[in-house]
Image (cartoon, helix red, strand yellow):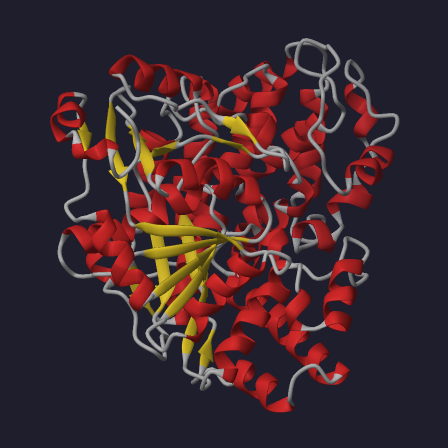
Amino acid sequence: MKLSYQGIQDKAAFEAAGIALPGFDWQTMCAETEKAPVWVHFGAGNIFRGFIAVLQQRLLDAGLAKSGIVAAETFDYDIINKIYEPFDSMTLMVSLKPDGSTDKEVIASIAKGIRADAADSAQWEALKACFVNPALQMASFTITEKGYALTNVKGEIMPVVTEDIANGPDKARHAMAVVAAMLYARYQAGAQPIAMVSMDNCSHNGEKLRSSVVTIAEGWVEKGHVPAAFADYVKDESKVSFPWSMIDKITPRPADVIRDQLAELGVEDMAPVVTSRNTYIAPFVNAEVPQYLVVEDRFPNGRPALEKAGVYLTDRDTVNMTERMKVTTCLNPLHTALAVYGCLLGYTSIAAEMKDEQLVKLVKTIGYQEGLPVVVHPGIIDPRAFIDEVVEQRLPNPFIPDMPQRIATDTSQKVGIRFGETIKSYAADPAKDPASLKAIPLAIAGWLRYLLAVDDEGKEMPVSSDPMLATLQAELAGVELGKPASCQGKLDGILTNKVLFGVDLKEVGLAEKIEGYLSELLAGPGAVRATLKKYLG
């Protein structure tokens, strides 16, 4: 069996293999999309193919849409060359269930993939043709948070951005300049309205997208490349809106076991490729079943019936509250606690950690006992039910190959949101005392212990990359395993740092507790396990 339009005509073979096929004709959908494109998506990777494209498939299957999605890739053109074009832009979606079974489906809602490359005139004009079409309602994005950045870590404008502003729309290279160039084409063709919808997993994503696009547009005005009215068009949210969203679905890298299963079923050419940009990607996507997409309902040119595909369409405050619920209480704090302790205890799988009695107690205490009393309830998703799903289905799923070492990356950039926000909520409530918290300060102490780069057996351990790693390790100089008192008086510079935690942990009465926990974690080999047992049973 081949994953292509011709290949899926052999319906009996796919059915025998347990692979669901689209309920619409791909060629007919492509012709409709060419005539009246409704949706362009920037970022052709796994979260798009395994989640966003599936939403439009549901609408096409139900007869609620006629056109598909045009996928535009601004960074890694090999994805289009090697994963889209040979397979008629189709994806084999494999949903990974906690019991080890899978659901398999051909996703055929992508009409075509385009290399958003100004140097490739045919591809550039194909993308422009979508944007000048009045039928276009939205452009969405999964380009990662870095895709919106115009500056480097030092806050300096990146050279490519400076060059893009100097060179104008026809030579755009940075993703945000490419987007601005497409909006300029739309402006020139009558300034039709459109929604620009970031679906990236970052806070206030719509605001980040808008800020970067406006910066490029204003730079072009200043350089005389475009009229001032174009910048006005981009800034007029009745014309060009930038809705906020919250997205949640784990789509890990292609798993060898899934590749092998598909080969055994007779599906050909499913081997992953490594692109010239070092993207590890396959013709199939494997992902967990649970998924959430909450989108601010501001679409000035109309929109697909996304609510019929399971998307929550709501107001900005609700989007914000849903994201806050996830990142400060119900998922992300649990992930970070598992990450640091998992590394210390030698785990290489989050799912394996969820068989560890003390670690399960740790994350349940953080979520249910310490987080839920101060959770922001968004109204559309129940926080307790969300945590239930996380601890009972998502984290223990052995077929989601997620590693604590990956999640421990950049922890200094996360602790303020993942732990600091709950601590602040306790401090702001006269009926609550931050010093009553147990599991959150234990997670923070575990992170400091992790930064020493020595595991619970006393062996050297790699520490994941972090922009503050050198600074933090310098602060911890002299703190040693086997010397419990070595941390005393050494932690003030870290624990009073409001940039790190969003709050002075000494002021709220937690510094002494964290120092005490760390001292116990330092007692010697095995002290991490002993401390977890002592406080969590």
Horizontal side of 387 relative to 363 (left or right) equals left
The image shows residue 335 at horizontal and vertical percentages of: 50, 35
Residue 438 visible within the image: no
Q: Is residue 529 above or below residue 134?
A: above
Q: Position of residue 131 (x, y in %)?
A: 45, 71
Horizontal arrangement in the rendering, residue 208 relative to residue 449 (left or right): left
Q: 525 left or right of 281?
A: right
Report the quarter where the N terminus lies.
top left
Viewer-nearest residue: 451 or 394: 394
Quick one: 315 or 6, which is closer to the camera? 6
Q: Nearer the viewer, residue 362 or 306?
A: 306
Vertical placement of 495 versus 323: above or below? above
In the figure, 362 relative to 217: above or below? above
User: Vertical placement of 61 versus 287: above or below?
Assistant: below
**Residue under the point 33% across and 49% down:** 53
> Percent from the top left, x then y, of residue 141?
48, 57
